[in-house]
Each structure stands twice: as structure tokens, then as C-alpha cells.
């Protein structure tokens, strides 16, 4: 990958895009919901977790307000429980980057592309994950839901990334994300390249419906879909599954 005409900013989701999704976020939501008396094994719990799965990529406060739409106090209490559970999970787990993540980000920075990580996780966990996974050195700026008035699927995070990095045109931005909310954020912000990644929680059809211009199996496949891009030899390639990439 020696030239990326027009793309000067690449925005990435974190968990499920750059960092392996080991279920910690779903577990944190499950534990948060359980603190409000909605326990595993009940139909109410199953409905709540279905809402969580559909809303992945949105800020936790927004997700939990969707779970408890008629009771703001329960939603706020559940959010506090979510934050505690997630902090504990991050501190206990061995967090690993998705294969090829560091190589792809490094190759982008070498050709002058700025890198932004966007996440719904709290700032403390965002910082810890980047440091643990060794990605901090290749990230220009990292933003979380706390940094903007509205989280995904609104365009605020992507536009904030443009402001922080000094990008002049929305068409110079690429969005790479594993959730429909993240993909829609990029579409609403005017990104010219919007890539859905199947290592996240949402399937190809959902990512395409949200506005993805491409859907790839893993971050290692990203250089091939960027303008002028081709994977550098150091990026490990994984086997492609054409049936999962239909229409990409």
C-alpha cells in the first residue's frame, strides 16, 4: 500500500474491529440488566439482550434507555452497573488485537493517513485497551462517547475526529466499524469509504443496510478496498468467505 489518494483520515471502531470481541461487553450489559431484576433465563431478559445486540455500537446510556424506555432511573442505575462490570472485565482479561490490526494501522500512518479510534467504551477502558494491545503508538486520536453530545449512529464522533485531526473535507475520511451504528455514523458524516467488518457483532446484511460501501472479513483485508490500496506483505491475510461478502 503505497498511495491512498483522497483518504487522509481513517476512523476505526475498537472492540470487534481492532480488538477481539471476547464477549465482555455483552456480559457487562447482561450483568447491568440483572441488577434491575431482569435475570437470565426469563423472556424479559432475552428481549432485553436482543435490544442490546441490535444497539451495539451505541453509547451504553442510549442502549440502556432503550432497554428501560419507561424508567429513566432504572436505565441510569443499570448504566452505573455496566460501567463497574466493564471496568472489572477489562482489568481481568487478556486483551488481544485482531490479527493484522497493528500492521494495517502502521501502514496507513506511514503514508500520512491519520488514525482515529472511536468507541462507546468509557475513557478509562479505552486508554487501557489501547495501551494493553500496543496500538497507542499508531493512533493519532482516540474518542469515546463522553467526548461528543451524541454517540453513534449520529455523526458527532466522526465529525469530532475530523476537527481533532484537521481534516478539511468529509470525503477524505474512511470509516471502518463492526456495528451498524458505527457504519451509519460514517455515512451520516459523509465518509467516502465506509467499511463494515465481520469480526464485530453485526452480519454483512445489517452492515450493508446501514450504509457500508464494503464489507470485509477482518481488518487485515482493509488495504485491498481503500483507493489505491493493496495489502503490504507484512499483513497476515485470512481466508475469504465469499458467501459472507456477497454484495461487498
Image: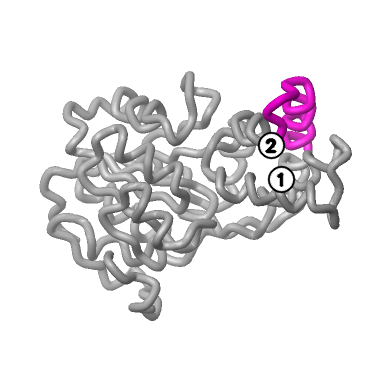
Q: Position of residue 233 (x, y in %)?
A: 27, 73
Residue nearest the observer in this picture, 187 or 50: 50
Q: Which residue is at 76% across, 47% downward?
A: 30
Near mark 1 (Cα within 10 A), the count class, few <14, some 14-19 or many ≥20, is many
* Residue 61 tag number: none
| Residues marked 2 and 1 touching at CB (< 8 Å) | yes
Against 53, residue 163 (above or below) is above
Percent across and percent down for residue 128 are 61, 41
Q: Is residue 127 visible?
A: no
Q: Residue at x 40, y 42 (%)?
A: 139
For label 2, the residue is 67
Provide the major secondary structure of the magenta segment. Answer: helix
Residue 57 horizontal/vertical position (percent): 52, 43
Q: Count the marks: how many? A: 2
At horizontal 41% and vertical 50% (from top left) the residue drawn is 177
Q: Residues within 10 Å of mark 2 (few under 14, many from 20)?
A: many
34 relative position to 178: left or right? right
Image position, residue 3 (x, y; %):
13, 54
Q: Which mark is residue 48?
A: 1
Q: Residue at x 38, y 45 (%)?
A: 183
Circle 1 — which element? helix
Decide: is 226 above or below 154.
below
Position of 193 compared to 30: left or right? Answer: left
Mark 2 or mark 1: whose residue is earlier in sequence: 1
Instruction: Using residue 211 as the reference point, say whether residue 204 is left or right of it.
Output: right
Q: Please say whether residue 210 is visible from this viewpoint.
A: yes
User: In this rendering, is residue 31 above or below 213?
Assistant: above
Image quadrant where one finds the N terminus: bottom left
Magenta-tinted stretch:
68-84
* Mark 2 → mark 1, Cα distance in angstroms: 6 Å
Q: Would you say residue 113 sits in the magenta stretch?
A: no
Could you tell me which secondary element the residue under label 2 belongs to? Answer: helix
Amino acid at each position: 500500500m503505497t498511495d491512498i489518494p483522497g483518504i487522509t483520515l481513517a476512523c476505526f471502531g475498537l472492540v470487534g474491529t481492532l480488538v477481539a470481541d471476547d464477549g465482555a461487553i455483552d456480559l457487562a450489559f447482561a450483568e447491568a440488566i440483572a441488577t434491575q431484576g431482569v435475570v437470565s433465563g426469563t423472556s424479559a431478559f432475552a428481549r432485553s439482550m436482543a435490544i442490546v445486540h441490535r444497539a451495539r455500537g451505541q453509547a451504553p446510556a442510549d442502549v440502556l434507555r432503550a432497554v428501560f424506555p419507561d424508567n429513566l432511573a432504572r436505565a441510569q442505575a443499570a448504566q452505573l452497573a455496566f460501567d463497574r462490570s466493564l471496568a472489572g472485565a477489562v482489568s481481568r482479561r487478556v486483551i488481544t488485537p485482531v490479527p493484522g490490526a497493528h500492521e494495517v494501522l502502521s501502514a496507513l500512518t506511514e503514508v500520512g493517513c491519520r488514525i482515529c479510534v472511536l468507541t462507546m467504551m468509557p475513557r478509562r477502558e479505552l486508554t487501557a485497551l489501547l495501551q494493553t494491545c500496543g496500538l497507542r503508538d499508531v493512533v493519532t486520536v482516540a474518542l469515546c462517547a463522553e467526548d461528543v453530545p451524541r454517540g453513534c449512529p449520529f455523526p458527532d464522533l466522526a465529525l469530532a475526529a475530523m476537527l481533532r485531526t484537521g481534516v478539511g473535507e468529509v470525503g477524505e475520511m474512511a470509516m471502518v466499524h463492526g456495528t451498524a451504528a458505527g457504519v451509519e455514523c460514517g455515512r451520516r458524516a459523509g465518509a467516502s469509504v465506509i467499511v463494515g467488518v465481520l469480526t464485530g457483532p453485526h452480519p454483512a446484511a445489517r452492515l450493508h443496510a446501514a450504509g457500508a460501501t464494503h464489507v470485509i472479513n477482518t481488518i487485515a483485508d482493509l488495504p485491498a478496498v481503500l483507493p489505491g490500496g493493496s495489502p503490504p506483505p507484512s499483513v497476515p491475510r485470512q481466508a475469504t468467505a465469499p458467501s459472507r461478502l456477497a454484495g461487498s
